[in-house]
Amino acid sequence: MVVSEILRIKGTVLYTTRPDVLVLDAIRVMVQHDIGSLVVMDRGRMAGLITFAEVLKALTENDGVLGALQVSDVYDRAPLTAEPGLDVMDLRRGMLERHARYVPVMDGSTLAGVVSFHDVAKAVYEEQSFENRMLKSYIKDWPDQGHET
């Protein structure tokens, strides 16, 4: 399975923000849509990613106050990204190594979507469940090899 298949299954609704938006407004969007990240877009190009991890770090560094902090003050400017043709197991390995919970999928310079660790885990689980069902079906239908009981 490749990353583009995950996007096809989950859909490609994109939630984005600009660098000049208040962090609090970005949080409101994430809460409203029950998502954990927003892609930061600047002049039509992906500039980075803001997740709850960056928000929590900013809260910690500012004694629990976000005040006038803008997305540009806190977002990750170099998030892990993936290409649509990347194998899901390679993506999973990269996410584990970088502790990345959300990965923008880039088709060249075009943002194709975002996959979460949850999306990857679900895809791997479903793929393994399908393979298990196929193997069980194959074993169940295994031709008798002439053994008498």
Image: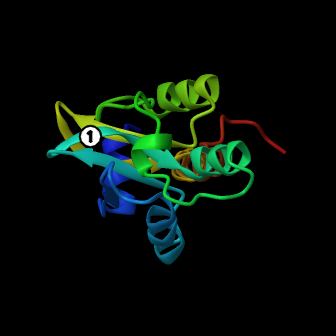
Q: Residue at x 53, y 49 (%)?
A: 51
Query: Relative to 89, is 25 above or below?
Result: below
Of residues 60 and 126, the one nearer the viewer is 60
Tag 1's secondary structure? strand
Q: Is residue 76 left or right of residue 113?
A: right
Q: Position of residue 44 (x, y in %)?
A: 15, 46
The residue that mark 1 highlights is 46
Of residues 71 and 149, the one nearer the viewer is 71
User: Outermost residue, right direction?
Assistant: 149
Query: Relative to 89, is 46 above or below?
Result: below
Q: Residue at x 45, y 29 (%)?
A: 80
Which color scheme is applied? Answer: rainbow
Query: Relative to 134, is 108 above or below?
Result: above
Q: Is residue 138 visible?
A: no
Of residues 127 and 13, the one nearer the viewer is 13
Q: Where on the picture, by quarter, is residue 96? A: top right
Query: Relative to 39, is 146 above or below?
Result: above
Q: Is residue 76 left or right of residue 19?
A: right
Q: Position of residue 41 (x, y in %)?
A: 26, 47
Q: Residue at x 53, y 25 (%)?
A: 94
Figure label count: 1
Q: Tag 1: Cα neighbours inside 10 Å, few (<14), some, or many (≥20)?
A: some
Name which residue type carries label 1: Met
Q: Where on the picture, by quarter, is residue 1? A: top left
Q: Position of residue 149 (x, y in %)?
A: 84, 45
Q: Is residue 143 visible?
A: yes
User: Outermost residue, front direction?
Assistant: 68
Q: Position of residue 130 (x, y in %)?
A: 54, 52
Q: Is residue 142 left or right of residue 80?
A: right
